[in-house]
Amino acid sequence: MNTGRWFLWTITVIYLCVATFLSAQDFRTTEFPSSAAALDQIAFIHGGTGPFAVAGYRIGERALKELNVSRGAFSLEVIHKTPNEVQWSCVADGVQAATGVSIGKLNLKLESVSRDAVETIVRDHTSGRTIVFRLKPQFVKRYLDLPHEKLRVAGREVLSLSDEQIFSVEGLS
């Protein structure tokens, strides 16, 4: 076999192996990772695992479940209404970690509002459904302005709370 044919044959075999592997993988899923893996995902996107980022992750998980949409779906759109302040805006990073929405895909948007108007709106353009999430006042009171050294432990705690302890949901049918 000459060198050119051998090279072409080798590239074809590699291509077929990679294509077979990738087609067997389901990169978009609504199954959620373990606690440790969830915290890793949040930290990868956000750089830490504070309570507001973890709350955003939990909002994203719930949105995918309620809308029956896979992570990474282009039909998903999130608008996070937030003050231009850390903690409040951290929620958007958590939602991104859970859902796969992003500013680069133009399906994650931030809108500046006051603290009393914070909410996360999640839409599925395919079904036309919209869900609105708001952090519970008790959650905000408990976790707002924690010292930096307590954020990681608080984030782990938030991961184990019930949804009802973190946020309210409107628009469920």
Image (tube, rainbow, N blue to C red):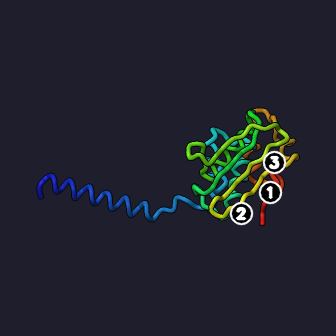
**Badge 1 element:** strand
Three-letter amino acid code at disc 3?
Leu
* Along the line of sight, the residue nearer the viewer: 72 or 151: 72
Q: How many angstroms separate mark 3 from mark 2 (CA)?
A: 17 Å
Horizontal and vertical percent position of residue 2: 11, 55
* Along the line of sight, the residue nearer the viewer: 25 or 40: 25
* Along the line of sight, the residue nearer the viewer: 75 or 156: 75
* First reached walking from the N terminus: tag 1 or tag 2: 2
Asked whether the beta carbons under mark 1 and mark 2 sit within 8 Å of each other, the answer is yes
* First reached walking from the N terminus: tag 3 or tag 2: 2
Horizontal and vertical percent position of residue 11: 26, 55
| Residue closest to the far left | 2
Q: How many angstroms separate mark 1 from mark 2 (CA)?
A: 10 Å
Of the numbered discs in the image, which one, if any, rests on residue 135?
3
Residue visible at 55% across and 59% down?
28
Q: Which residue is mark 1?
A: 169
Three-letter amino acid code at disc 2?
Glu
Q: Is residue 169 visible?
A: yes
Horizontal and vertical percent position of residue 150: 76, 37
Local crowd at mark 2 within 10 Å, few (<14), some, or many (≥20)? some
Asked whether the beta carbons under mark 3 and mark 2 sit within 8 Å of each other, the answer is no
**Badge 2 element:** helix
Three-letter amino acid code at disc 1?
Val
Residue visible at 79% across and 54% down?
161
**Badge 3 element:** strand
* Along the line of sight, the residue nearer the viewer: 19 or 114: 114
Q: Which residue is mark 2?
A: 66
Q: How many angstroms separate mark 3 from mark 1 (CA)?
A: 9 Å
Residue visible at 80% across and 58% down?
170
Q: Quadrant of residue 81?
A: top right
Asked whether the beta carbons under mark 3 and mark 1 sit within 8 Å of each other, the answer is no
